[in-house]
Amino acid sequence: MLLELTGITKKYGDFFANKKIDFSLEENEIHAIVGENGAGKTTLMRMLYGMETPTEGSISVRGIKHKINNPNEAIKLGIGMVHQHFMLFPSFTIAENIVFHHEPKKGILYNRKKAEEEVAILAKKYGMNIDPSQLISDAPVGVQQRVEILKVLYQGADIIILDEPTAVLTPLEVKDLLISLRNLSKQGKSIILITHKLNEVMQVTDRVTVLRDGQVTGSLKTKETDTGHLSKLMVGRELAKKEKTEVKVGASILSIEHLNIIENSSKKKLLEDINFQVKAGEIVGIAGVSGNGQSELIAAITGLLQVNEGSIHLADIDITNLSVRQIREAGLAHIPEDRYLWGSAKTASVEDNLMMTEYRKKAFQKNGILHTNVIRKFAKETINKFSIKTTSQEESAQNLSGGNLQKLIAAREIQQNTPFLLAAEPTRGVDIGAMEFIHEQLLMKRNNGDGVLLISSELSEILSIADRVLVMFEGKIVGEFTQADVSDEKISLLMAGGKHEQG
Amino acid sequence: MESLFDLSLINSTLRMMAPLLLAGLGGAICARVGIFNVGLDGLMLMGAFLGIAANVLFENLILATLFAVIGTAIFSLILGYLIINLQANMIVVGIALNFLSIGITTFTLRTMFDVKGAYYDNEMAGLPVIHIPIIREIPIIGNIFSGQTPIVYLGILITILLFFFFRSTVLGSRYDAVGINLTAAKSQGIKVKAIQYQAIIISAVLCALGGVQLSLGQVTMFSENMTAGRGFIALVATMLGQSNPFGVFLSSGLFGFTEAISIRMQSMNIPTNFTLMLPYVITIVAMFIFKDKTQLNALKNNTGSTR
């Protein structure tokens, strides 16, 4: 056995982050660790990588017990980690990033030429396509990820831990990554894949270990299981099958006509002749690889970006180029793309974050003085109703887990009871439980006869809840499907620009 | 009456810019490892004072300079501890250090030498002026470069060394890495705190040399708050020069030049109030012209807590 963790326990005060976890990894194996956010996956890997020390239990590599006190010791044992948030230096070249801390030297001088040569050889050996002299900040995310993996390989790792590697990738990049992982395992590397995307687990891994609340709830061969069983082990209950009731589609709520947005400096068309409607009682999904105009579309609808040509109507009001506040008052609720950048104020309290779109309403203020008691009661009710896990209402939003913060934002926007909701990436980086919950809320909104526009780079999300699907590519809408005739393949093809590609 | 522009103006520019250059390089090193060092002025003042005080005690210029350098380096550890270990706000700590420095030097000046305002002793020797043998013979260049204190030459040398350090050495690239992405450097097993302490200590040493040039090079005296905001001008030089040693050299050269001109203009019929204003006006104008966004970003990234 290459790696064996036995009886690993990690306690923070009275809280067990990990409880008596057994885990093993064989040579050439790809072993997935799945579980919801907060199940203890990352804690476990941080102990293996020497960033935390276990309260109890032992780690042995190639049959010998080791105490791993810091990342340097882990690297010496051949353990490397690719972090969820990339650890890169933007103004360094790819080669400089890869050889960092193990730079080839000439005396005290940095031998950059040799670094580039070594990196080129390494990349070739593992079949990863990169340009060593390119600046990392100019490279797309998929390449940056490759660089992270190469960095670990350069340090001589045999055991590679990947922490949610696909969270930031486009579908095509995910495909590339999974192929690379297969290659690596063929060339003698062993891989631990932390994820909560079960279809990736099924595609690429040999074994799966499932964690829930810091404990192992199952360790299985991938061949002998399926996503249904795994998600049951993860969540601890059967996931409810989504029952979509038929809703009568009503009048148009959002209607966009001939919308054009042109970038100021380059005169490039960011959005080109966008036309569509969202009607009462339907969820319209916009699929597409991120960066194909979705962000601009969101910004145009919500009033964050100047519209050059065309019009946007919301519930019969022309909202083209109105201010954000006017648009919101016309009936928009908006779950923003990035929950930290746009969706919340990190250092403000949970209560204040819930109030952000409400505080002007008569119920909560009079002449600019807030009714604190009413607000407190309202926040308490919302937290209970949407089961947001927080220690208190005064807790600052940044201390909430990603899933809970997303629930908070969704709760805030859904409670607006507006006729139209724009939900952008509503479940990005959120675990299955929270995802199920948010989807239910969106469906409920639709069933109430409101219109929902769902913009997501997660195709499965769109396919499961949207009534109608539009596909965006390079700032244009390139296809429209109803739920009856939609399929994974058709959309994927359009998302990639309508060309056949060998992946 | 002497004319405003001649070769000796460049010579005095070199003399005037040396303190700014040294402190500016100190600021640049800190900026490269992600520390916005607002305490340059205080460190310089401390160096200037310790230089004079030690010269009185030891009557030896080398010992005096050494004493100033070591003393200021120890003093800078306060800055390091507060910023690096306690994660305090860099600007607040830097400004506090400046006031602390004014307080300590003024207090010690009064208790030690029993004078108010300024201390000087006609007998005291200042830094010697060196005439470099071969260079002084070359007609024009001799006039420009010769006849400076050793610290001026040291400043030029350090500029070149630092440029080389950041461009070509492994350690230099690690300094940069810490400044660009602290968390990433840490995750690769770099001892981030050690590097940041090194940078602060080096900047203190450079500031101290700048201070000694002020108190023992340009004049031979110490007056209360004698840096008169030069540390802040040096900070501007750091930002203007984009934390690149040659950039800092050029921008501190600009400020040194205006200072030299303002002194020259005093001998003409221009009110001193205006001439003394010149370096500061130029500094403000320079800030408007060259806005350096990277510096601001570094500031934004580093004032919050770093995990």
Image (cartoon, coloured by chain):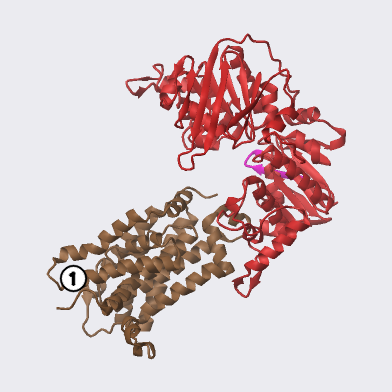
Residue B65 screen position, x and y as percent: 37, 78
Residue A8 screen position, x and y as percent: 75, 45
Nearer the observer, B3 or A373: B3
Magenta highlight range: A7-15
Nearer the observer, A274 or A348: A274
Q: Which chain contains the residue that carries disc 1?
A: B
Query: Relative to residue B233, is residue A452 depicted above or below?
Result: above
Chain with colour red in the figure = A
Is A10 in the magenta? yes
Residue A99 lies in quadrant:
bottom right
- Quadrant containing the C terminus of chain A in the rendered view: top right
Residue A36 screen position, x and y as percent: 69, 34
Chain with colour brown in the figure = B
Q: How many marks?
A: 1
Residue A289 lies in quadrant:
top right
Query: Relative to residue A449, is residue A485 depicted above or below?
Result: below
Residue B216 lies in quadrant:
bottom left
Query: Relative to residue A109, is residue B149 depicted above or below?
Result: below
Q: Relative to residue A5, is residue B66 drawn left or right?
A: left
Residue drawn at 64 percent across, 50 percent down: A144
- Quick one: which residue is furthest to the right in this view? A224
Q: Give the structural element (helix, strand or loop) at label 1.
A: helix
Is B136 in the magenta? no
Amino acid found under the numbered disc labelled 1: Met
Residue A270 screen position, x and y as percent: 53, 35
**Residue assigned mark 1:** B265
Residue A414 in sight = no
Residue A52 in sight = yes
